[in-house]
Amino acid sequence: MNEQMTQPDGTPRLGADVLGGGQRRFKPYPAYKDSRVEWLGEIPAHWEVKRLKGIFRVVNGSTPASGEPSFWDGDIPWVTPEDLGDLVGATIATTRRNITAAGYRSCGTTVVPAGSLVLSTRSPIGHLAIAGVDLCTNQGCRSLVFRDSASREFHYYELLAARPELESLGQGSTFRELAKGTLENVELAVPPEPEQRAIAAFLDRETAKIDALVAKKERLIELLQEKRTALITRAVTKGLDPTAPMKDSGIEWLGEIPAHWEVKPIRALARPGYKTFTDGDWIELPFIRDEGIRLIQTGNVGIGEYKEQGFRYIDEETFRAFHCTEVFPGDVLICRLADPVGRACLAPDLGCRMITSVDVCILKPASDVHAAFVVYALSSSEYLAWLSGICRGGTRDRVSRSMLGEIQVQKPPLHEQRAIAAFLDRETAKIDALIAKVREAIERLKEYRTALISAAVTGKIDVREETA
């Protein structure tokens, strides 16, 4: 990827430059014709258009009876949409589950040869891979077996570019599915075979460069997140004064703390009074409404942040009948379930009344406790790792409210709590802004990758000389 394709930060240029505009990194073909296919638009004059069934034999998948042990854990790879969705790279060779020969014979799936394409046609439509081994699929996928020696890599890229078209053709109310007959009639551009190979080679090379850039930026995000975690842990356990005398806290995960800090159980951070440190409420599904008093659930509690997702409510009658505990903005919410167990956030101001589900504890801070400091303290990596370690077992990690309340934590003087929270607000905001910028760059790279593939496989750019 040369300099004229990139911006000063190394991110590839987008928009017209991909299609040959701006500094004209790529040139168009000499002549075009109307493909008469909406998603393809104009294509090079010497290219053909073929229905998918003229290039591939479309093979359905199926599932053996789930309750029959003899059908499972064999040596026949069995692909599902989830396998395709989790795939890193273009080739699939291993699957979550394999089936036995008996399982294979019991249902309508078919083994297809390595080199075939595997496409998810249900929940969701459009995940795609090249079969690295002989394999079969469930009914959420269809296999595309080449009828001749066409470039599998070119058609892999073409079907990636066709995903919006494939998704638009799905039908169904419960879930959308791309029917076999509809898939077979999808129209594809077909260049001469030498061009297919040239386009595929070009895209292999260029997408590898883009993917390498994405990987570097994702690693940068990991490093920034590690720095953020370390910053929080250091501030809430050692304070802001590096010269302060230290003492042993007597707590395994906490280690040394400033000598003038106290150690208190979490329950002692709550103000005195009724329901100042308590569980949320058990609200069963029949009592859930579409509006009213907001029900905050475990998924809303992140590590140090409230996460807006899952809108559920109860009505006033249910609130009174269950003697619910109302949550107010600034209360500390502590999740008793993984992942990780013990994470905390401040209750937000959602502009409505709020309660929490039973696995979210409510701590209403005492007058000498700064709520934001408590959240930062309960976001310490050492604390979360220690608590997760002692809560493992059963189907899900969980801590009881009584056990949570007895956990010993650090308690600096109130003025230090405020100073530490203000310092962390400021410094984590800087790191979060950097992370946001890197994520934006990753999205631009991914958009560029998608645009480049689409431009190449539909003939909007001529890349034949790029691989000559």
Image (tube, rainbow, N blue to C red):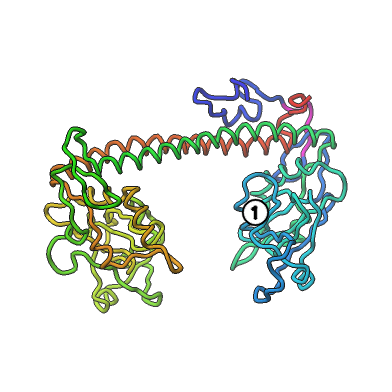
Please tell me in which quadrant of the rendered image residue 193 appears.
Answer: top right
Vertical placement of 132 versus 172: above or below? Answer: above
Residue 262 in percent (x, y) is at 15, 50
Q: Is residue 342 toward the left or the right of residue 117 in the image?
A: left
Residue 77 in percent (x, y) is at 72, 59
Please tell me in which quadrant of the rendered image residue 283 appears.
Answer: bottom left
Image mark count: 1
Vertical placement of 336 versus 261: above or below? Answer: below
Q: Is residue 338 toward the left or the right of residue 76 in the image?
A: left
Residue 231 in percent (x, y) is at 31, 39
The front one of 111 and 382 is: 382
Could you tell me which quadrant the N terminus lies in?
Answer: top right
Could you tell me which quadrant the C terminus lies in?
Answer: top right
Task: Point out the stretch of residues depicted in magenta.
Answer: 28-34
On whether residue 108 falls in the magenta region, the answer is no
Residue depicted at 80% across the width and 57% down the height: 112
Which three-letter amino acid code belongs to the residue tagged 1? Leu
Please tell me in which quadrant of the rendered image residue 20 appears.
Answer: top right
The front one of 45 and 401 is: 401
Q: Is residue 355 toward the left or the right of residue 68 in the image?
A: left
The front one of 464 and 207 is: 207
Crowd class of label 1 (few under 14; some 14 to 19; many from 20; radius 10 Å): many
Residue at the disc numbered 1:
84
SS under mark 1: helix
Q: Residue furthest right?
A: 148
Residue 196 in percent (x, y) is at 80, 37
